[in-house]
Structure formats: C-alpha cells, structure tokens
Image (spheres, rainbow, N blue to C red):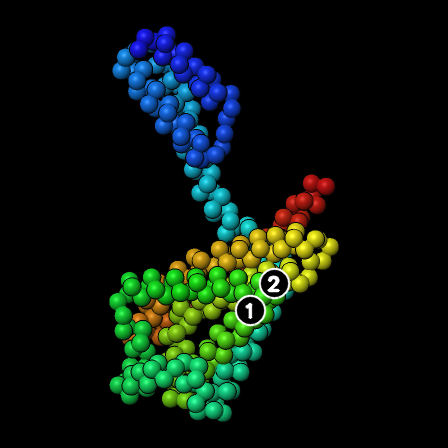
Amino acid sequence: MREAAFIKQNREKWQSYEEHATTDADVLAERYVELTDDLSYANTFYPKSNTALYLNNLTSTFHHTIYRNRAESWKRIIDFWRYDVPLTVHENFAKLIYAFAIFTIAAGIGWLSAAYDDTFVRLILGDYYVNMTIENIEAGDPMAVYSSQGSTPMFLGITMNNIQVSILAFLYGLFFSLGTFYLIVSNGIMLGAFQYFFYKYNYLLVSLLTVWIHGVLEISSIIVAGAAGFCLGNSIIFPKTYSRVESFKRGTKSGLTLVAGCIPLFIIAGFLESFVTRHSTVSLHVSAAIIIVSIIFIRWYFVVYPFQLYKSQNDATNRKN
C-alpha cells in the first residue's frame, strides 16, 4: 500500500484518537494496540518517514497515559483504605458499637448457657468437634485441630469462608437488619460456648493465647461486617430525609465499603491461623505480642484514626471557608 493511501485510510482514526481523549482503561488499551499495529506497519514500509515519526509520537503519548493511569489506580486503591474506609467507619460508628455490643452480649449468653447446660456445647459446636477436641485434650494437645490440615489449603479455605461470612453479614441486612442481627448473635454464642468448653477443661488460658492470635482480626472483621449489614438494613427502615431508593443506595455503598475494608484483615487472620496458630509450641511472648499488636491496630484503625481523619478534614474545610 502506498504511504498516501495508508494515511488516507487511517487519518480520521488517528485524529479522533488525538481529539477525543479518554480515561477508560479498556478503550485506551484498544486504541494503543491499534496504534502499535499501525506504527509497526509504517516502520516496515515507510521507515524514517513523517508518518512513522507521527505514529511513534502518538503511540508514546498513549503509552504514557496508560501507565500513568495504572499508577493512579494503585494510588486510588491505597486511598480507599487510607480515607474511604475510615471515614465510612466514622459516619457509621454507632452501628459499629451496636454490632460490638450485640456480639459481646451473645458471647456472654453462649458462655452462661454452656455453664448451665452440659449439652449446649454439643448443640452449638457439634458432637464431632467436641469429641475430637476431648481426644486432643486427653492426648495433651488441645489445639491439635489447627494442625490437622495442610497450611496452604487451610489458609485458602479459612480466608474464603471468612470473606463469605462477612458478605452474608452484609447481605442479611436486606431482611431489615434482622438477618445481620441473627448472624452476629449466632457467631457470638458460638464463641462464648467455645471458650467455656476450654475453661471447663482448665485450658482457657491456652485457648486464649492460641485462638486469639488470629481471633482478634477475625472477630473484629465479623463485627465490622455486621455494621455493614446494619448500614444496609437501616437504610431501608430509616431513610431519614432521603427517598427510600436514595437511602438504600447510600446504605449499600457504605456497607460495601466496610466489607471490602475487612478483606485484608481476613487474609491476615487466615494466614495467622494457618501458619502460626497451628504451632501449639509458639512461645507465650510471641503469642501475646501478636495479640497485643492486633488489638492496638484494630483500636487505632476502627476507633481512633477515623475520628482523627474526620477532624483533620473538617478543620481543613473550615480554614478554606
């Protein structure tokens, strides 16, 4: 093909790409591929021509735009956990307190129920788990259940299960928050019965120092997911000054932000449970250090930092005004 015919065939496309910029990643990628094909053709048949030079410059522009957008995308991901999640926590902090209080009361109910009814633990945890744990206790390794499976399969299974639970806690909010309430209560009762079971066999401290290596992050994330469910459910029940549809949209966005914000915590909790908790010989100091650091982080990220961030942004806005 003659160079003039090649230019005539593609001129409008090239001009359109120059004049109608886009930030859509898929469109950018498609245009970039087409331009590199045109550039390759021009370099083959019209080397050192103005057409090849023009296409090289245009392709370089698209290349720069694509990689700049990639960098901005990573920044946006970081900003999501740096700003979006904490500010959403601040906006819905009361719901977080409700979820925490409900879970704590439910755990107390589970503990007391197990203390006053010998069959309650089996009802909640199941005969298989109880019998297996009793056998492990008699064998001198009460936490053996955590080493009964390979680390990697265990990590994947636990992490996916925890994420699934958090999504369900959110979606159950569709049932006017009652579904979320039920899930929080059932998990709280299970934890209370579980801890009393080890208390009964004089292994409470061992269980606390073992289970809570991953439990601090895991349980905290479930509580946050419960708050996400309340965001969704309460948006339907209490639309306030918004239309019910607009309130639902806002509640859904807030809830999804909280659930997504928990995913890294579930991954870390799954890692700790699969690769650290399984080692019953882990030293007291290491176990205590992980638990304390986890508690400090949860308190900072979900209690202290959201209010600090909100105050700093509010102060900045006031200074501008």
What residue is pinned by disc 1?
A: 179
The residue positioned 47% from the left and 47% from the top of the image is 78
Does residue 14 appear to the left or right of 41 in the view shown?
A: right
The answer to whether residue 130 is above or below residue 168 is below
Image quadrant containing the C terminus: top right
Circle 2 SS class? helix
State the separation of the CA atoms marked 2 and 1.
Answer: 9 Å
The residue positioned 62% from the left and 50% from the top of the image is 312
Q: State whether residue 165 appears in this view.
A: yes
Residue neighbourhood size for the residue with mark 2, other residues' Cα within 10 Å, grouped as few (<14), some (14–19), many (≥20): many
Residue 71, horizontal then vertical, whole percent: 43, 38
The residue positioned 72% from the left and 58% from the top of the image is 240
Q: Quadrant of residue 123?
A: bottom left
Residue 270, horizontal then vertical, whole percent: 37, 64
What residue is pinned by disc 2?
A: 233
| Closer to us: 203 or 122 | 122
The answer to whether residue 61 is above or below residue 237 is above
Q: Amino acid at mark 1?
A: Gly
Q: Quadrant of residue 130?
A: bottom left
Residue 277, horizontal then vertical, whole percent: 34, 71
| Closer to us: 257 or 173 | 173
Q: Amino acid at mark 2?
A: Gly
The residue positioned 31% from the left and 66% from the top of the image is 154
- Marks 2/1 in contact by CB < 8 Å: the verdict is yes
Circle 1 SS class? helix
Residue neighbourhood size for the residue with mark 1, other residues' Cα within 10 Å, grouped as few (<14), some (14–19), many (≥20): many
Q: Which mark is residue 216?
A: none
Q: State whether residue 205 appears in this view.
A: no
- Dot 2 or dot 1: first in sequence order is 1
Q: How many marks?
A: 2
Residue 159, horizontal then vertical, whole percent: 38, 62
Image quadrant containing the N terminus: top left
